[in-house]
Image (tube, grey):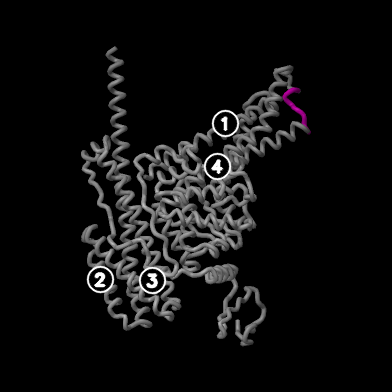
Amino acid sequence: MAIGIGIAVLVIIVLLIVGVVVMYNGLVRLRNQMNNAWSQIDVQLKRRHDLIPNLIETVKGYAAHERETLDAVISARNMAQGAVGKGVGAQSKAEGALSGALMGLFAVAEAYPDLKANQNFLSLQEELTSTENKIAFSRQFYNDSVLTLNNKVQMFPSNIIAGMFSFSEGEFFEIEVPKEREVPKVSF
Amino acid sequence: MWEQIRANRTKSFVLVGAMAAVLLGIGYIIGMMFFGSPIGGLFIALIIWGVMSLVAYFEGDNIFLSISRAKKIERDDHPRLYNIVEEMKIASGLEYMPAIYIIDDPAMNAFATGRDPKKAAVAVTSGLLQNLNRDELQGVIGHEIAHIKNRDVLLMTMCGVLLGTIVMISYYMMHMLFWGGISGGRRGGGGGSGGAIILLVGLVLMIVAPILARLIYYAISRKREYLADATAAQYTRYPEGLASALEKLGGSRLQPQSANEALAPMYITNPFRKKGKAATDLSSTHPPISERIRILRSMGGASFADYNASYTAVHRGGGSVMPVSALAGAGSLGIRAASSEAAVGEPSKIERTREVSDLMWKKNNYKTINCNCGTKLKVPPNIKRFTVKCPHCGTTHSV
């Protein structure tokens, strides 16, 4: 009888340990996935910053007197570069402004047929459009990862493990732009 | 949100297990019929299956890519396609960038290969690149990346091997039965009515097993297609892209030139599709295109839950297609706006056609000379002459 109880207790303890290990590993995996997703966003943001000087040069050759629009993009880019490493909140704001400025530039470019036919401009536009998409998709994946991690951190029973090993909730990355997922539309 | 892939795998493994059971059943009965004991038959079945599995596992993707005459392309060959694949790679959270192949074929189709995400590849036909715009291409690539991410390539390859083994063994055993007689009887032992029963069971199994295995195979494949559609919608947040691509694919009458039956589940639409097949066809690798479009178009959001709700609505309450675990805690996800074509600097269909044909010339080692009159001269790689004349303006160019 005593042996039976002893075995039962032992089994329960082993199961508990296994459960804790599984939950702990799951949390670690999610946290790594989230950090990895964040570095993906960084890669794409940096790529966008790098593409802009090229774009400015190309546009200048055809539409030099659009100073205002060009300056807006340049300053937005410098702001965004300055915000790197200053936290998710600051960075999302600066990147949102940059997206807006770029939209303005592409809208202006529509009025210059020569510019629009320029091979260099076209490939830059494809690169920037795609980078914009990649930012959106890596943000989407990052936010999905944050959501999954936060659910685990908040919900029973994984919240106990999360509390024990101090897993903290992730911060969502939101870019605030009017109709941010929409590429610039032009009406004449 | 990514947990469901694991749950889904379990379900598919049950079906694969059923196929393996059919194979073992055949092996058992062959053993009884020809050797008087199940061991020999099981041994033969397992050896054939093992060899075929190893070949498929290690060489399957290379074989598929070479029989479909796919050519590998790099970023500079087609930046837009490369970018779209990279976008979907990011959206899916895949760790490795899949290789990209292009097939010179006016028919529209695409497929994915690669036993694991590390060795994955997506292949598209030149017809697809010509006819689809950016959003549509993104939908198709999203579907293919979903096959890679959901490990469908490995699953369907292994199922295909099982099916192939079952069909092959049954075929040869039938022939041996008819032409070689049964050695089991000669060995005496059981004999009499026992032998007759085994013979009867064996005959029935040889006929039924390949059909049964094929039905299971198609059932698995169709399920994975729905899942890949749902996943693509979730990645792109834009079900309309894939729906509109499927519409174009469905409207085309062209059949791929070098499709392979074993690879059929990996294509975006069934390459052996015949017009006017019944909507609930059990003998197809893919659900009917019109139904897939209807489900995608009536999605209220872009999540698995939205897809599932839409599936149920289209089937008038006909059950659900997603595993329960996939839907747990999954809310609705917003759908993004369509990209406006002009603003993306998106090439028109004519430009796309030119782009793709230039790429195919290049991939076939043709040299391009730009003539001053605007004509592009394509010079074959094995040219013997030193000069070519422009057919439009008559200028002579040195090669």
Q: Residue A63: image x %, image y %?
A: 35, 82
- Residue type marked 1: Ala
Is label 3 on the same chain as label 1? no
Mark 4, mark 2: which one is toward the viewer? 2
Is the C-beta separation of discs 3 and 1 under 8 Å? no
Q: Pick whichever, B330 or A16, lies toward us.
A: B330
Badge 1: residue crowd in 10 Å (few <14, some 14–19, many ≥20) = few
Q: Residue B359: image x %, image y %?
A: 55, 69
Say if residue B113 shows up in the picture.
yes
Residue at image location 47% in from the left, 51% down from the top? B297
- Residue type marked 3: Val
- Residue type marked 4: Met
Nearer the N terminus, badge 3 or badge 2? 2
Residue picked out by circle 2: A78
Residue at image location 40% in from the left, 54% down from the top? B237
Residue A127: say if magenta: no
Q: With respect to residue B99, does B348 lie above or below?
A: below
Residue picked out by circle 3: A186
B61 lies left or right of B40 = left
Badge 3: residue crowd in 10 Å (few <14, some 14–19, many ≥20) = some
Q: Quadrant of residue A13?
A: top left
Residues in magenta, as a range: B179-185
Residue picked out by circle 4: B158
Residues at marks 4 and 1, CA–CA distance in whole angstroms:
14 Å
Say if residue B119 shows up in the picture.
no
Q: Chain of mark 2?
A: A
- Residue type marked 2: Asn
